Image (cartoon, grey):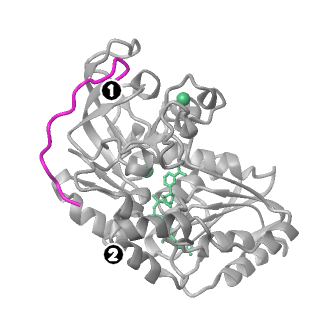
Amino acid sequence: MRVETVPDPVIEEPTDIVIRVTSSGLCGSDLHLYEVLSPFMEPGDIVGHEPMGIVEAVGAEVPHLDIGDRVVIPFNVSCGHCWMCDQGLMSQCETTQNHEHGTGASFLGYSKLYGQVPGGQAEYLRVPHADFGAVKVSKERPDDRYLFLSDVLPTAWQGVEYADVPDGGTLLVIGAGPIGDMAARVAIHRGHRTIVADLVDERLARVQGRGAETIDVRDLGATEVADRVRDLTDGRGADSVIDAVGMEAHGSGVKAVHKLVGLLPDAIAEPLMLKGGVDRLTALVTAIEAVRRGGTISVSGVYGGAADPLPMMQMFDKQIQLRMGQANVRRWTDDILALLEQDEDVLGVESFATHHLSLEEAPEAYATFQKKEDGAVKIVFRP
Ligand SMILES: NC(=O)c1ccc[n+]([C@@H]2O[C@H](COP(=O)([O-])OP(=O)(O)OC[C@H]3O[C@@H](n4cnc5c(N)ncnc54)[C@H](O)[C@@H]3O)[C@@H](O)[C@H]2O)c1
Ligand SMILES: [Zn+2]
Ligand SMILES: [Zn+2]
């Protein structure tokens, strides 16, 4: 990761806007690009997919925005009028799908797998399909009130929706990074009993402070974590589980494969990713063990391997329901915005970020966030 000067973006399509970025999140998804997905990155790719800012230029077909408006930009680049967008599946938008790689909708700053769209950890950003995507927000409150509408909030919200927690049921959230933490906040706000598992003290302390029960998984295998969950749930397991960790889980033995994929020349690493099993599956296997029979697993964490071994006998025998995918951001933003507009900061978004840094500090910030040092849970750049 480097900070470079590049030409300022300009309007290219009538549905574009250009914004001056005022805040831009650093996400666990960026860490995948930093390590295991790095074979799909090219020199000069601009990263970042959680931006907000002030409109500087408006294309001819963006009637809802004017210069000077304050907007949050969803990480999905979605058109809003194709068949998939009509189904509320904006992360599968048929207008911006990437047929060459067989992937869904394009995302800001997310490698050639997802359209190689220049991202938002930058001073200025061209926003494609802003006529649908850009969410206008009030100018009254601090950026952090609204910033997480770009990714963290809709991802956590969809995670909880897909988890389908029954009335009076228990939700287990695996991972207390920004996504798991926010998913726990949303679930607690909805009145669900919520248990959160992670291995980093300050992350566990944060969710405990919001009313979650916690499990420190540091010295536990998947089965032991599941045993703890069963002890807390009449021996059955959690009704619903969210995997908010994904493919770089701590605790399984294949870290070496990741390191290797990161080091190999792209020509060798890419086919390995596209044909092999490269994920560290500890979190997903924990979810499969800890969910009760007939329960639901909702996978928010990103996975990337093509041939990962999963315990199919156990999954079938337990009658597990499994839902997953990138968040369909605009499907949820109106509902979430209504909550954010309340005077009370219901989900604690204004104190959610642990670090506000300049763009110049980005290379160190990536390293700090990856190593979970310096109490870093959520880093926000202020270009
Ligand atoms: N589906 C989506 O649309 C979407 C959007 C944003 C992020 N994500 C994904 O969500 C995941 C989490 O992102 P994040 O921003 O919260 O970042 P993060 O990487 O900081 O969070 C991961 C957390 O999981 C914990 N963890 C690691 N191994 C674990 C294990 N075996 N058991 C329990 N906890 C474990 C880590 O300590 C960390 O706190 C990433 O995979 C990211 O790519 C998905
Ligand atoms: Zn993100
Ligand atoms: Zn679409």
Quarter in which the N terminus is drawn:
bottom left
Mark 2 residue crowding within 10 angstroms, few (<14) / some (14–19) / many (20+): some
At horizontal 40% and vertical 43% (from top left) the residue drawn is 115
At horizontal 66% and vertical 80% (from top left) the residue drawn is 222
For label 2, the residue is: 263
Question: Whole-percent x and y of residue 84?
Answer: 62, 32
Q: Is residue 188 left or right of residue 107?
A: right
* Residue 9 is a magenta residue: yes
Above or below, comparing residue 20 to residue 16 in the picture: below
| Observer able to see residue 36 | no
> Which image quadrant is residue 92 in?
top right
- Highlighted range, magenta: 1-16
* Residue 154 is a magenta residue: no
Question: Whole-percent x and y of residue 339?
Answer: 55, 34
For label 1, the residue is: 70
Above or below, comparing residue 358 to residue 105 in the picture: below
| Predominant SS of the magenta segment | loop
Question: Whole-percent x and y of residue 238?
Answer: 76, 65
